[in-house]
Amino acid sequence: MVLASGMPVPVPVAGAGPVNLIERVAASVRACSPAEARVGRLLLEDPRRFATLPIAELARLAEVSKPTVVRFCRHIGYKGLADFRLKLAGVINEGVPYVHRAVTQGDTPAELMLKVIDNSVSALLHLRNQTSAPQVTRAAAAMVESIQGGRRIEFYGVGNSGVVAQDAQHKFFRLGCHAIAYSDAHMQVMAASLLQPGDCAVFISNSGRMRDLLETMDAVRRRRATTIAITASGSPLAERADIVLAADHREDFDRYSPMVSRMLHLMLIDVLVTAVAVQLGPELANRLSLIKRNLRVKYAAEEAD
């Protein structure tokens, strides 16, 4: 999420179907005149508002003339404002025109809420459209094989990704498998050195280029355990992994604390744990029932004390 005042609105996240209209507008802004570009940026800031405001109000907000608004619509391939709005309304009604909008210092809490949520929705839609189903299938199958074979599933992450690794450990632990998370670089190398074929090591990293994680990945590969990477596609970590679950987004992880990436990584963990749980079937149901029964006994004893 961009947290600098006055930065231009970023190009929206790529996706399928109707989002292409917003992408086309974003791409056209670069080739427009300065006045027409202001109209384009006004649209990208809030497509819903652009679709409903009178042309006079659009011109005022963009600080251009009314003919300039019409020229912009023609520049991107429509007959005029009415024709463009007809298409834009269809996109908005289909519920996918969420745009990554820059946060500025003057935003109110209400505006911040909309921008943060819209950015998250946009990233989730992109993840849904771009995630490789075969890769998810391969990752889930490898983890099921590890669980059923009594092998280990380990999660490696540092910083924010370490928190995601802890969440993954908790969720997979409930499935009845030998799951553990490591966020310390030294512990990661030590743990990786003890893995065996049939074990799974899941690496979680926003950038996928941290040296410590790459060294640990190499250690896991030498032990011939299965490596799964939740990271940016094309990153050094992704290139080393057996299975890659890509989480691509436009967040500047070099300058700002990760927000969207953490959410995407957590979502991919949820997808994995759900896919594994479904494949475990009745065996898992019995384990979960036992856990819940023992917890009820524990809580009842505590209340009695």
Image: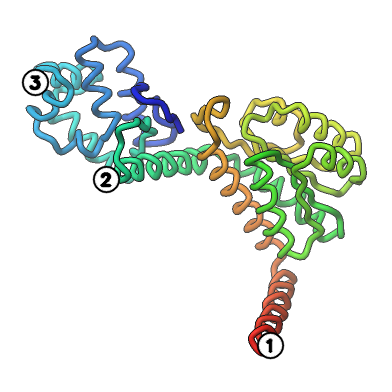
Q: On the rendered structure, is 125 left or right of 137?
A: left
Q: On the rendered structure, is 292 left or right of 130?
A: right
> Mark 3 — residue?
66
Q: As shown in the figure, which amino acid type bears the numbered disc 1?
A: Asp
Q: Residue at x 39, y 45 (%)?
A: 117
Determine whether label 3 and label 2 are within 8 Å by CB.
no
SS type, badge 2 = helix
Q: Is residue 111 above or below residue 84?
A: below
For disc 1, the neighbor class at 10 Å (few under 14, some 14 to 19, many from 20) is: few
For disc 2, the neighbor class at 10 Å (few under 14, some 14 to 19, many from 20) is: few
SS type, badge 3 = helix
Horizontal and vertical percent for residue 226? 81, 42
Q: Residue at x 69, y 57 (%)?
A: 276
Disc number for residue 79: none
Image depth: mark 3 or mark 1 in front: 1
Q: On the rendered structure, is 245 left or right of 88?
A: right
For disc 3, the neighbor class at 10 Å (few under 14, some 14 to 19, many from 20) is: some
Disc number for residue 93: 2
How far apart are the alpha carbons under marks 3 and 2? 26 Å
SS type, badge 1 = loop
Q: Residue at x 33, y 29 (%)?
A: 22
Which residue is nearer to you in this view: 280 or 30? 30
> Mark 1 — residue?
305
Q: As shown in the figure, which amino acid type bears the numbered disc 3?
A: Lys
Horizontal and vertical percent for residue 29? 30, 17
Q: As shown in the figure, which amino acid type bears the numbered disc 2?
A: Asn
Considering only order in the chain, which callout, 1 or 3, is on the residue closer to the N terminus? 3
Determine whether label 1 and label 2 are within 8 Å by CB.
no
Image depth: mark 3 or mark 2 in front: 3
How far apart are the alpha carbons under marks 1 and 2? 56 Å
